[in-house]
Image (cartoon, rainbow, N blue to C red):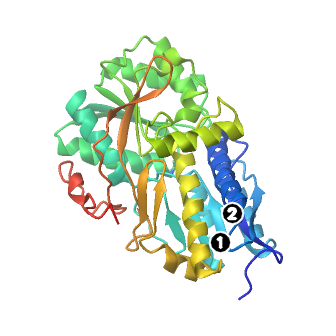
Amino acid sequence: MNPSGTGNSWRVGVLFSQTGVTAATEQTQLNATLLAIEEINANGGVLDRRVEPVIYDPASDPKLSRTLAERLFQVDRIRLLFGCYMTSTRKAVLPVVESHRGLLFYPTFYEGFEYSRHCIYSGAAPNQNSLQLAKYLLSTYGNRFLLVGSNYVYPYESNRLMTDFVMQDRGKILDEIYVPLDAGSKDFDKVIRRIKKTSPDVIFSTIVGRSTALFYEAYRAAGFDPRTMPIASLTTSEADVADMRPEAAEGHITAAPFFATLSTASARRFVGSFRERYGPDAPVTAAAEAAYFQVHLAMRAMARCGSDDPERVLLELRDAEFDAPQGRVRIDPENNHAYLWPRIARLDQHGRFQTVWNPGVRIKPDPYCVVQSLDDWSADDLQSSSH
Ligand code: ACM
């Protein structure tokens, strides 16, 4: 088969939103994807051919994401696609990828319970972020949770899992509230009232996108104390925090495999290159870090097989490893997800994530949560991380 691209370049598809509700985080993913491609091209490309990204803006919209994916495969003739943040967009795009026998590289934490042999999942599955966060919150703050999320599939499913974990601890879900994806301040009035009324130990937030900052600001304005009742989240990243005042961010908690404040040499190198390229205040997120390392993994696989044929690239990705900014990652051939390094951080008074829990272990992905025990997650630690 002929590789995609014209003569002397490899053409790949890139689909991250530059507009719409999740633009802030997706822009960090786009930046990271292009940074990795630039690094590869500066080193001679792949087998002496440049990598050429074909970029569209799906505007945080599942339907438009699907249309643009169709165009990338049919008109632009790409075979490998890097993209998607919200689960709703991944679910819209994946059937297109499958029908063209392509390969989607998806760099976002998500709810799990999915497998496609046409997708590499480089963000965290629930056993690599939710489980650890639940355990930390239950042992640090208490077991009476209030759940609040954006009104779409990822928050529903993520809350369902968090509920299972809280129940294992004989805890209680005091309320489960959904606001529109593009919620305004008024939508949060009810949430604040319910928090006042129920007085939980923890707020678990699966609010996604630009209304995140509004929620944290409303929380602060209501006078709640994050030291005794934090907002804990998997979705609130450096990109959301950049949109709030540090006073509104301070004390709240996020679990992720990567934070821009990590002090390892590879994390400092990545954040340094990112900020050199995009400016000193450019937010760097876990979703961006996954977007970055998955390009490197994909291009190495292409270099090894000399092709962008998705079947051949997939074969090369079996057990493939890469020294990512978060630590050495690996693609699990059982499920196409990545072995990752869970961490938990609390926001300080400057709005910077400071690590509060970092076990230094790499966790095998378990996207279907086969092991769904709060006490069992570390059993999945891979002993062969020195491979
Ligand atoms: C998400 O929708 N996976 C954040």
Q: Amino acid at mark 1?
A: Val
Query: Local crowd at mark 1 within 10 Å, few (<14), some, or many (≥20)?
Result: some
Q: Secondary structure at mark 1?
A: helix
Number of on-image labels: 2
- Is 65 displayed left or right of 362 in the figure? right
Q: Amino acid at mark 2?
A: Arg
Q: Are marks 2 and 1 in contact (CB under 8 Å)?
A: yes
Give me the residue at 75% from left, 77% from top.
Answer: 4
Q: Secondary structure at mark 2?
A: helix
Task: Determine which of the numbered discs, if any, sits on residue 115 in the image.
Answer: none
Give the residue pinned by disc 2.
66
As rendered, which of 49 and 92 lies closer to the eye? 49
**Which residue is farthest front?**
43
| Viewport quadrant of the N terminus | bottom right
Residue 31 at least partly seen = yes
Residue 142 at least partly seen = no
Give me the residue at 57% from left, 51% from top.
Answer: 86
As rendered, which of 384 and 78 lies closer to the eye? 384
Across and down, in percent, residue 82 comes to 63, 61
Across and down, in percent, residue 264 comes to 43, 41
Give me the residue at 51% from left, 77% from top.
Answer: 316
Give the residue pinned by disc 1.
96
Query: Local crowd at mark 2 within 10 Å, few (<14), some, or many (≥20)?
Result: many
**Vertical comparison of 212 with 71: above or below:** above
Q: How far apart, in angstroms, are the residues tagged by discs 2 and 1?
A: 7 Å
Q: Earlier in the sequence, mark 2 or mark 1?
A: 2
As rendered, which of 137 and 49 lies closer to the eye? 49
Give me the residue at 50% from left, 18% from top.
Answer: 350
Across and down, in percent, residue 144 comes to 25, 30
